[in-house]
Amino acid sequence: MENSYIILFLCVLVMLSYVFTLLSKYTQMPSVILLLATGVGLRWLSDQYNFSLDYINDYVQMLGTVGLIMIVLEAALDLHLTRDRIPLIRNSFLSAIIILAVTVLAIAGIIHYWQQESFMISVVYAIPLSIISSSIMIPSVTYLGQKKKEFLVYEASFSDIIGIMVFNYFTAKEVLSWQSTISFFGGIIVGVLISLVISLLLIYLLTKITVNIKFFLIFSILIFLYVSGKMLHLPSLIIIMIFGLLINNWHLLKEQKLVQLKIFENGAVNQISELLKSITAESAFLIRTFFFVSFGYSIDVMLLTNSEVMVVGSAIVAIMLLTRAIFLGLFLKSSIFPAMLLMPRGLITILLFYIIPDEYKLKNFNEGILFFVVIVTAILMMIGLMLENVKKSEKQPFPKDRSS
């Protein structure tokens, strides 16, 4: 009976998440807020009935790792590379890297002043808080204008990948030396080359496997490569990104020798691309559902009422808004609204916080700040999308009176 109840409960969560996705379409409220609220509600119920889920943080970390891979793959499968998009890609990349760098330094300054700890350790804590969450951004900007939508998708994807690579660099044993810097950039070059070879092999494998069961085999291989690369301190997330970009932009390789020699069948690759997009989106939706409900369950709501959490958290959010307002105007060739408010923190921020090495841990850092920033940035995003929706509605002409 207990197993039956668990199965029913998980099915109800998935159905609720689907309803939340539909609601977000009409209300512009990011579904992540509703998922977090569901988790918080479940925590309250479990406290009322003296029931608790042990090792919830372990589940959050595991789901976060798999979710990260699926979400980056989903983002890469949405990115179309064409010549006319080069300025957009360049601007979104520069926006992501500059806003990330300035935000990290500013937030590190706040943490350093507040905790009176090493600035380097403050940087380690600032990096996760500075990364825009593509897991929230991508499904939330679907109904924006095409140019703004593409800019924000590229920016969030670049922010994820660059942020994780920088976090891995600053949590390494040796930091800010010639040897570590050369090793860092050398690792990126090696990672890109290995990623290209592995991605081509995986695409070849997909086109040659005749049995229907092949996509989750590829997912398993990608997860294996990501975790293995992470253990070897390689930027293994690049493998996921390049694999998605290659399979979604196969048309760029039409004139290459690989295609001319018919090693790859162009039609088969295009067909696989469409199927992979669908399966990846479904898988990312499922993992995102359980991740944010689990994270909501792990939140101690009372921490959010702490005055220290509110003051420091508000200062961090204010820095994010100010930095974004200043630099978005340089790279977004249109109004910075609502893009200025679209800066959600989510899966990657949470995941990186959980894997900060012990030697970099701050004893007095209040986890309520993490919860505060995730929730407030999600609310700001909701406000921005709602105001944009109202703005569009006001611009639409009134229907003519047919009776006249």
Image: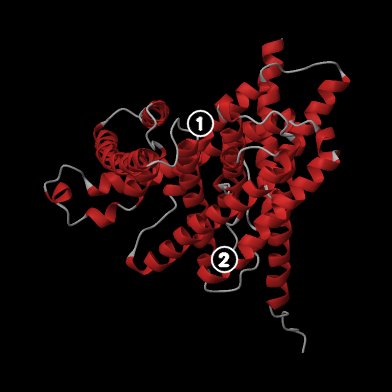
Left of 38 or right of it: where is 201?
Answer: left
- Which residue carries the number 1 mark? 66
Residue at 63% x, 31% y is: 290
> Residue 323 lies in what quarter of the image?
bottom right
Q: Quadrant of the C terminus?
A: bottom right
What type is the residue that disc 2 sits on?
A: Phe
> Which disc number belongs to residue 257?
none
Mark 1 vs 2, N-terminal side: 1
Furthest residue to the bottom? 404
Residue at 17% x, 49% y is: 259
- Which residue carries the number 2 mark? 327
Q: Quadrant of the N terminus?
A: top right
> Residue 399 lies in what quarter of the image?
bottom right
What type is the residue that disc 1 sits on?
A: Val
Mark 2 nearby-residue class (10 Å; few <14, some 14–19, many ≥20): some
Q: Is residue 266 visible?
A: yes
Q: Position of residue 173 (x, y in %)?
A: 45, 30
Mark 1 nearby-residue class (10 Å; few <14, some 14–19, many ≥20): many
Residue at 47% x, 51% y is: 158
Q: Where 184 sits versus 226, above or below?
A: below
In front of the other: label 1 or label 2? 2
